[in-house]
């Protein structure tokens, strides 16, 4: 399938939609998930147009992986997490909903299950506070 230039993440990259940005390189962007499955849930995306892992250029994937590692370490520290769930979905059958390659980083805590994906958006002030915690850990 062809890359959709009007997907929500493409719009964020173009500045047409807002996000709570936490980390950026010349090839990747990390921002808070507006429908988090846990406190501190962050997304990392390549700036390159890539539908998913099946069509991304190898160099863009390598840079994405580097950004994921940087943000994951910061998320674990910032939220004093016991661990992390890192997820990446491909195509509808694989659970992908937004068709721009993205990686979920979710801080995890012993005995605390992931919230269900209900489609409910988190309060902007809570996302802003989580973003600030992550940015502080990245400094």
Image (cartoon, rainbow, N blue to C red):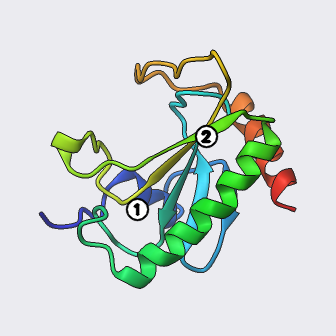
Q: Quadrant of residue 133?
A: top right
Figure check: 11 above or below 110:
below
Q: Quadrant of residue 128?
A: top right
Measured as percent of width and height from the top left, residue 48 is found at 41, 75
What residue do we see at 51% from left, 69% from top?
64
Instruction: Give the quadrant of the N terminus.
Output: bottom left
Measured as percent of width and height from the top left, residue 55 is found at 24, 72
What residue do we see at 44% from left, 78% from top?
60
Q: Is residue 14 left or right of residue 5?
A: right
First in sequence: mark 2 vs mark 1: 1
Disc number at residue 10? 1
Viewer-nearest of discs 2 and 1: 2
Q: Is residue 44 left or right of residue 124?
A: left
Disc number at residue 26? none
How far apart marks 2 and 1 lie (CA) works out to 26 Å
Marks 2,1: beta carbons within 8 A: no
Q: Is residue 135 left or right of residue 18?
A: right
What residue do we see at 52% from left, 27% from top?
37
Kindly state the secondary structure of the residue where label 2 is placed: strand
Dot 2 corresponds to which residue? 84
Of residues 88 and 45, the one drawn nearer to the viewer in this rendering? 88
């Amino acid at each position: 399938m062809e890359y959709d230039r009007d997907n929500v993440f493409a719009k964020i990259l173009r500045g047409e939609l807002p996000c709570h940005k936490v980390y950026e390189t010349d090839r990747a962007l990390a921002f808070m998930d507006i429908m988090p499955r846990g406190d501190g849930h962050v997304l990392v995306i390549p700036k390159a147009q890539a539908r998913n892992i099946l069509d991304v250029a190898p160099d863009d994937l390598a840079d994405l992986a580097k950004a994921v590692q940087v943000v994951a370490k910061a998320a674990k520290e910032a939220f004093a997490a016991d661990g992390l769930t890192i997820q990446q979905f491909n195509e509808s059958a694989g659970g992908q909903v937004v068709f721009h390659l993205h990686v979920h980083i979710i801080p995890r805590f012993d005995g605390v299950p992931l919230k269900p994906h209900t489609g409910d958006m988190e309060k902007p002030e809570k996302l802003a506070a989580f973003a600030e915690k992550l940015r502080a850990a990245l400094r």
